Image: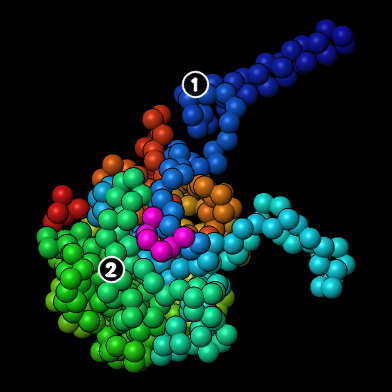
Amino acid sequence: MNTAGSLQRTLAACVTGFTLGTLTSAGSAQEPAFPGQKGGQDVFGHYEVVADWPKPLSQLPGHEGWTWGAGQYVFAESPDRVFVLQRGQLPVVERPQAAWLRDMGPSVTFPIFRLPLRDATRASPPAGGGAGGPPEDGLQAWVDGGGRLGIDARWRHCILVFDSEGNIIEDWSQWDDMLSRPHAVYISPYDPDKHVWIVDDYRHSIFKFSNDGSELVQTIGTYGEPGADESHFNRPTFMAWFPDGSFVVADGYANTRVVKFDADGNYLLEWGQRGNPPNETRPGYFNNVHGIAVDPETNRVFVNDRQNHRVQVFDENGNYLDEWHFGDPPSDIHMFIISGDGYLWAADRGTSKILKYDLDGNFLYSWGTWGDFPGGMWGVHGMSVDQEGNFYIAEVDSGGAQKFRPLPNANPDYLVGQPVYSAWE
């Protein structure tokens, strides 16, 4: 019996050792995230945060004491020309010592260690987001609701352009008064003239500018007038292009449809109907169309059906093809992009992570951590990658934008791939 028991123990130890060795040895099922490194964590993925990008807003004369408003979107034309869209500016607030607030309730203190002091999207004009109504003038609605211009916020410098060091190299303030709630900024990868596009959801319009910002070339939608026909939007959010220059618009917060235009901005077609959140399962029914991307290889259109927590996939004519579920709350996918190497990268406001999927919906990887410190994320609302592989985010809750640089030993599978630059490489 003793011999048999010893043999059983020996066999069990061999099996256990073989199993553990299979899981942890080189070339095994689980490779180290950073080969050759002991310890550490995958907090910022395979990036390092560029903590001094952008430089403080005080680099502008007369802006001491002011900082970034809600960061709506970021687009990198190149490492030395990065557009950042924000909703005005907020005053710098120094973090006070924690104090008891017993008048509010027992055992309540503020501020709480490590928690952000202010939510930029609630503080920046106009507040409201997807849950708010569509006022004709968002800034005026913010003022009417008690917002104090010059004290609580300033409606200035909504479109800024930065170089690789974080210096402001262009200031498009000449367009501030025209904007009400700028939501996204782009340059089409198929446009050799590199026109700059800005979506404003409270103005129900999309603006096409010359590359230097000196000229408003075209307005799509009827300025300041909501609607749901060929010439109107109702709070559009994002857009994406096909290789022939035609494009689709996510329309959006109030409407629940996708609208397609030709390369000249002429209406072609639309699809989508209002669903029943949060568990709508019917194809082509949406709630809060808040993100859209086009696969340049197949022309498939990926639509972020945000309040139903799913992506729906269509062909270029709006015919339903596929879908997958992002996960139940706290997941809250803000938007996504499709990289040139054929992956979908999504920004999850609920978990403060950047998620990687293949285009069949298989989850591959995620990274990111919540916080308002350099590298922490709160409310990622825009993403972009430049030609050097630097990754940028804009954050509505933290405010402003951030830049991440690939680590020297980064695994390309863990980096957000560069976009297509078809017409202007």
Residue 363 forms part of the magenta stretch = no
User: In which quadrant of the rendered view does residue 291 lie?
Assistant: bottom left
Image coordinates of residue 315 in percent, x first then y, are 28, 69
Viewer-side residue, 39 vs 48: 48
The magenta region covers: 59-64
Q: In which quarter of the image is residue 411?
A: top left
Tell whether position 61 is magenta: yes
Question: What's the amino acid at mark 1?
Answer: Gly
Q: Which residue does the numbered mark 2 point to in the structure image?
A: 172
Q: Which residue is rendered at x = 32% and y = 43% of the image?
A: 389
User: In this rendering, is residue 355 above or below 195?
Assistant: above
Res 194 label: none
Question: In this view of the protein, can residue 325 be seen by the observer?
Answer: no
Q: Which residue reaches farthest top?
A: 3
Q: Earlier in the sequence, mark 2 or mark 1?
A: 1
Q: Is residue 335 left or right of residue 105?
A: left
Residue placed at 51% from the left, 47% from the top?
375
Secondary element type, mark 1: loop
Mark 2: few/some/many CA within 10 Å (<14, 14-19, 20+)? some
Nearest to the eye among marks 2 and 1: give it. 2
Of residue 174 and residue 12, the one placed in the foreground of this image is 174
**Residue 120 coordinates in the image, percent (x, y):** 53, 67
Residue for point 77% across, 16% down: 8
The residue identified by callout 1 is: 36
Q: Position of residue 274 (x, y in %)?
A: 45, 85
Separation of residues labelled 2 and 1 (CA atoms): 47 Å
